[in-house]
Amino acid sequence: MSKGTIVKVSGPLVVAKGMKDANMFDVVRVSDERLVGEIIEMRDDRASIQVYEETAGLGPGEPVESTGMPLSVELGPGIIEQIFDGIQRPLVRIREMSGSNIKRGIEVDSIDREKKWDFVPVKKVGDKVETGDIIGTVQETILIEHRIMVPLGIEGTIVSIEKGSFSVNDTVAVLEDAEGKKHNLTMLQRWPVRKQRPYKRKYTPTEPLITGQRNIDTMFPIAKGGMAAIPGPFGSGKTVVQHQLAKWSAADIVVYIGCGERGNEMTDVLMEFPELKDPRSGEPLMKRTVLIANTSDMPVAAREASVYTGITIAEYYRDMGYDVAIIADSTSRWAEALREMSARLEEMPGEEGYPAYLGSRLAQFYERAGKVMALGQDGRMGSISAIGAVSPPGGDLSEPVTQATLRIVKVFWGLDSALAYARHFPAINWLISYSLYSDRISDWAAENINKEFPKLKADAMRILQEEASLQEVVRLVGMDALSKSERLILEAARSIREDFLYQDAMHEVDTYCAPMKQYRMLALILKFYYLGTEAITEDIDIEKLFNIPVREKVGRARFIAEENVEKDFNAMEEQMEKEVKELLAGGDDNA
């Protein structure tokens, strides 16, 4: 192990000399307090170290010791339900040891070494196994079966395997390789966070990640294994959208990274998730969630580590065959940390002071998402869906972090402060947002929901775009200058916006909307448009058409409980047809 001494301290950056035997990205212990750091630059025998803890009080001459190992995470049973900091220290156990404030240099195992887990073998003595094969399972939570896999680089024949109660360090199986060497397998693995975990093959995502949010699932869907960005100015609802995605998305496991955001937002997550029920299982959401808390008052260097820690944990569960959603709030704070460290290293700045490698670092994170076939003989499939918030200063979407992100991701949910100020949530602007997965997911929707769904979505988007053009005319010459068909478009667009795209995250029914209910809601709104299009060819009073009684029920349709959707929506469709028919027949009683 290489040892050196500090020659310079500049905030989270420490420079040490005498480190010629150290390697890039080695983890080091800084000073007698043994603060955790990572080497990010080598010049001769001088190592520049980003320290993941507060460096106040450090000075030249203090010792630095390299561990000779890269920054790694511990992988094994006991990760789900945990709250980690950016370098995978368990915050609950740290609080038990040192109180509410994290003491500098505190050392604690990421995964509890004492806790016993019931290991159930799925392989037997004599079975031949290779890297990635599942040798046994542990019930980690009531929702998640933890699958113990053969580590990378090991294959051979099982010579012993036992059922029983073990800690993560205990040997649960012994393998003998082709050379006759024996390998003891435990339930604990370590993996360098900057190194992507290997897989057999990557596939094109074709199945949607259902989120229960109408604006997303219907208009701008993300696929399982897809990449999405949520840029938006302060106050536009990024965090609430991400909380909704973490709560309701149809992923088996959610990894939520609070990366440099305000502490009270992370507190909301910590307080809400244990109380919320998973809509599919009825169990608390924490039973399938990992939280990484790295708030804005924590050391800036740990923001970068937190993103890599989260994606490595996500890859581990993906390799078990799970669909994982990783949500980073926000990548802008991570980019700001890169900018600060780059400036302290005196590197040549790029646009707006960000380092020249900003785009490649963002790509390294997002490209680890995807749908893959995991290593092993059983051909199991898993996916990681990566969703990152971006916080552009002043809502300027042309700034470097947003632009670099948009070059990588395939879904753009552009939040609009004007919609947020108008109390329209989620404030996703339908005129600037897009999803490059739409065509593939339309095929899935036609097959699994209704064959008319893709057409309804296309008609809804056309109406919203036509509304934007007509609004310009209305502002110039007023509503009276429009024809009946144009006024019908404006009325239909208003209904799509207010009755369908608007969704109340705080309402117990409206907070989550299943795909079939989304289809029925959109079909009901567009049925009014189609019936109206036929009706205005007759000489009718268009105001009476707009005010038929059933439209009040349509406006409240989002509050209909799931079990009543079929009955209530059928009744509304019948009532709408009847009222329009009576209007055409001159039935003024319904006006």
Image (cartoon, rainbow, N blue to C red):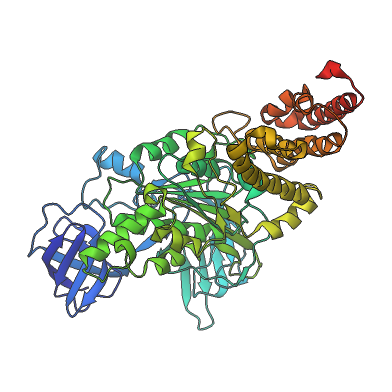
User: Residue 377: x, y in percent?
Assistant: 64, 70
In x, y percent, where is residue 120?
Answer: 58, 54
Image quadrant where one finds the N terminus: bottom left
In the image, 338: left or right of 424? left
Residue under the image location 10 percent in, 63 percent down: 62
Frontmost residue, 584 versus 425: 584
Left or right, 239 with reference to 17:
right
Observer-nearest of 105 and 297: 297
Q: Does 180 appear above or below 462?
A: below
**Is 370 left or right of 17, judged from the image as shown?**
right
For residue 418, above or below residue 72: above
Which residue of the protein is positioned furthest toward the bottom in this rendering?
179
Residue 171 seen in render: no
Name the image quarter holding residue 474: top right
Residue at point 42%, 37% (across, down) = 270
Q: Is residue 36 above or below residue 24?
A: above
Which residue occupies the extreme top position in the image? 589
Q: Can residue 185 be seen in this view?
A: yes
How far across and down, in percent of the image, does residue 434 sit? 59, 55
Where does the image place residue 372, in percent across and percent down from the top left?
A: 60, 66
- Residue at x 85% of width, y 15% of height: 589
